[in-house]
Image (cartoon, rainbow, N blue to C red):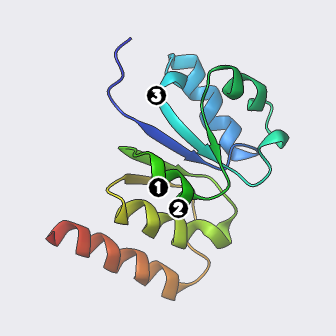
Amino acid sequence: MNRTCDIVLVGIAGYGEIYLNALEEKGYLSWIKGVVDINPERSNYYTKLQEMGIPCFASLELFYQTAAADLAIISSPIHFHAEQTITAMENGSHVLCEKPIAGSVEEVERCVKQEIKQEDS
C-alpha cells in the first residue's frame, strides 16, 4: 500500500496503543515516521516498532529536528497536550489530539492562536 500520510504518534502506551492497533489493522503502521514517549518500553508495540525500524524520540522537538510528519497524533497525558499541539503545528503538521485538548482555557486559547497563525501564513 502506498503511503499517503506520514505520522508521528506522541504517547504509545495507554490510548496510544488504541491508535497503533487501528493503524496496524488497516495496514498503516509503516506510515509512522516516529513515535514520542519517555517510557516507550511500556507499550506492547515497542518491540514491533523497533523491529520495523520506527525511531522513538524522548520529545516531539527531537522528532522534528530530524523528521517531519503530515499528521501528529497526540495521545500523551493531558498536561502535555497544548505544548505538543503547538509544537506540531509550528512544524507544519496537522494535529489529532485526544480530548481534552488542554488542561486550562488559557492553554486552549494558545492552541487556537497558533492555528490562526498557521492559517495566515
Residue 65 bears which disc, if any? 1
* Amino acid type indicated by mark 3: Trp
Q: Quadrant of the N terminus?
A: top left
Q: Is residue 67 left or right of residue 40?
A: left
- Please tell me whether residue 23 is drawn above or below residue 101 in the rendered image: above
Residue 29 position in % (x across, y down): 55, 24
N-terminal of the two: label 3 or label 1? Answer: 3
Q: Is residue 74 left or right of residue 57?
A: left
Q: Is residue 37 left or right of residue 87?
A: right
* Amino acid type indicated by mark 2: Glu
Residue at 46% from the left image edge and 39% from the top image edge: 7
Residue 62 position in % (x across, y down): 55, 57
Residue at 33% from the left image edge and 75% from the top image edge: 114
Task: Measure the C-alpha gap from mark 2 to mark 1.
Answer: 6 Å
Residue 5 position in % (x across, y down): 36, 33
Say which quarter of the image contains residue 41: top right
- Other residues around mark 1 within 10 Å, as few (<14) / some (14–19) / many (≥20): few
| Disc 2 target residue | 61
- Other residues around mark 3 within 10 Å, as few (<14) / some (14–19) / many (≥20): some
Residue 31 bears which disc, if any? 3
In terms of secondary structure, where does tag 2 sit?
helix
Task: Measure the C-alpha gap from mark 3 to mark 1.
Answer: 19 Å
Extreme bottom residue here?
A: 106
* Amino acid type indicated by mark 1: Gln
In terms of secondary structure, where does tag 1 sit?
helix
Residue contact between numbered discs 2 and 1, judged by CB atoms under 8 Å:
yes
- Other residues around mark 2 within 10 Å, as few (<14) / some (14–19) / many (≥20): some
